[in-house]
């Protein structure tokens, strides 16, 4: 996956977690989480498998997510890329948690 200029920072979010690794991992984790055919055990196995596939530990991934909280513009660009990777439009669910919607008028 290639990120556009707004999503590519040229530095890791945290050591070992690049923007593209974060996007690919988060997109795959969302697919596992939204798979209604999986039970709790299979879902947990799927999460572990996704992290392993991307060469990450849960701790590394959580640190990256926390680091993005301190860089909301970067986080927004990455989550838009996650949404695109999963076939959602940029406006569907792309807002940061806690971000307020702008009025449409």
Image (tube, helix red, strand yellow):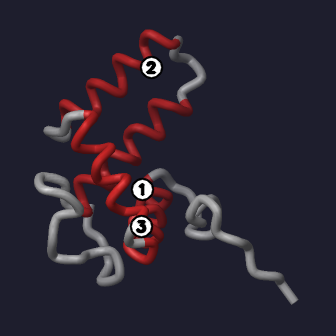
Q: Does 75 appear above or below 39?
A: below
Q: Which residue is mark 1?
A: 85
Q: Give the mark count.
A: 3
- Identify the residue at image location x=47%, y=70%: 76
Q: Does 9 appear above or below 40?
A: below
Q: Are marks 3 and 2 in contact (CB under 8 Å)?
A: no
1 or 2: tag closer to the N-terminus: 2
- Identify the residue at image location x=28%, y=48%: 63
**The C terminus sits in image quarter:** bottom right
Q: Does 69 appear above or below 39?
A: below
How far apart, in angstroms, are the residues tagged by discs 3 and 1?
Answer: 15 Å
Look at the numbered disc 1 and give the secondary structure of its residue: helix
Q: Which residue is mark 2?
A: 43
Look at the numbered disc 3 and give the secondary structure of its residue: helix
**The N terminus sits in image quarter:** bottom left
Q: Are marks 1 and 2 in contact (CB under 8 Å)?
A: no
The local crowd at label 3, few if under 14, some if 14 to 19, many if 20 or more residues have their Cα within 10 Å, is many
How far apart, in angstroms, are the residues tagged by discs 3 and 2?
Answer: 25 Å
The local crowd at label 1, few if under 14, some if 14 to 19, many if 20 or more residues have their Cα within 10 Å, is some
Q: Which residue is mark 3?
A: 75
How far apart, in angstroms, are the residues tagged by discs 1 and 2?
Answer: 20 Å
Q: Is residue 64 left or right of residue 96?
A: left
Look at the numbered disc 2 and give the secondary structure of its residue: helix
Which marked residue is nearer to the observer: mark 3 or mark 2? 3
Along the viewing direction, whichever of 88 and 14 lies nearer the viewer:
14
- Identify the residue at image location x=22%, y=43%: 60
């Amino acid at each position: 996956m290639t990120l556009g200029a707004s999503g590519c920072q040229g530095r890791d979010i945290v050591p070992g977690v690049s923007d593209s690794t974060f996007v690919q991992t988060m997109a795959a984790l969302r697919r596992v989480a939204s798979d209604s055919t999986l039970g709790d055990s299979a879902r947990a196995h799927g999460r572990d498998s996704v992290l392993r596939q991307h060469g990450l530990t849960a701790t590394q991934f959580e640190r990256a997510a926390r680091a993005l909280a301190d860089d909301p513009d970067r986080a927004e660009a990455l989550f838009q890329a996650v949404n695109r990777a999963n076939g959602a439009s940029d406006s569907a669910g792309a807002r940061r948690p806690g971000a307020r919607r702008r009025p449409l008028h």
